Amino acid sequence: MSEKMKLLRVRSRHKAKKPEFNRHDSHKKVRLSTSWRKPRGLHNKLRRQVSAKGSLVKPGYGSPRFVKGLHPCGLPEVLVHCLKELGPAEGCAVRIASTVGRRKRIEIESKAREMNLKILNPKAGGA
């Protein structure tokens, strides 16, 4: 088993254990979104790391550096809008943008299959 695949497995196990980092008190107030904001209040219990109040975002929760940003299949992901963008996508996993129409999507999918690229979001009734 390659080192990359081993690290991808480690990353998936870490992500399964990682807590959900929500903004402090976002469940109480509708106006607060759940996106993470660091608590900075003087009496804030989350900032003081009271265990019952949840976990703070820290570097230890991150993925291994070698596989950071890779798709779970082990390839870097590239977003494609047109045929020209397939050229530099050699050795990458291709995700076709949602704004691409059916006709152009069929062209992109057939070209990507010719180049032996992995398509992450193929249409079932495509080419």
Image (cartoon, helix red, strand yellow):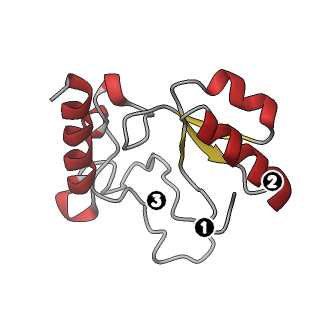
User: Judging from the image, what secondary structure is the residue with disc 2 in?
Assistant: loop
Location of the N terminus (image quadrant) = top left
Q: For the residues marked 3 and 1, what is the alpha-carbon distance in whole angstroms?
A: 38 Å
What type is the residue that disc 3 sits on?
Answer: Arg
Give the SS element for disc 3. loop
Specify whether 107 is left or right of 51. right
The amino acid type found where label 1 is placed reads Ala
Instruction: Indicate which disc, 3 or 1, sits on the residue closer to the N terminus.
Output: 3
Residue of label 3:
23
Query: Which is nearer the eye, 34 or 71?
Result: 71
- Upstream in sequence: badge 2 or badge 1: 2
Task: First in sequence, mark 2 or 3: give its number.
Answer: 3
The C terminus - image quarter: bottom right
Could you tell me which secondary element the residue under label 1 belongs to?
Answer: loop
User: Residue sitting at 19 percent across and 39 percent down?
Assistant: 10
Q: Amino acid at mark 2?
A: Val
Circle 2 sits on which residue? 100
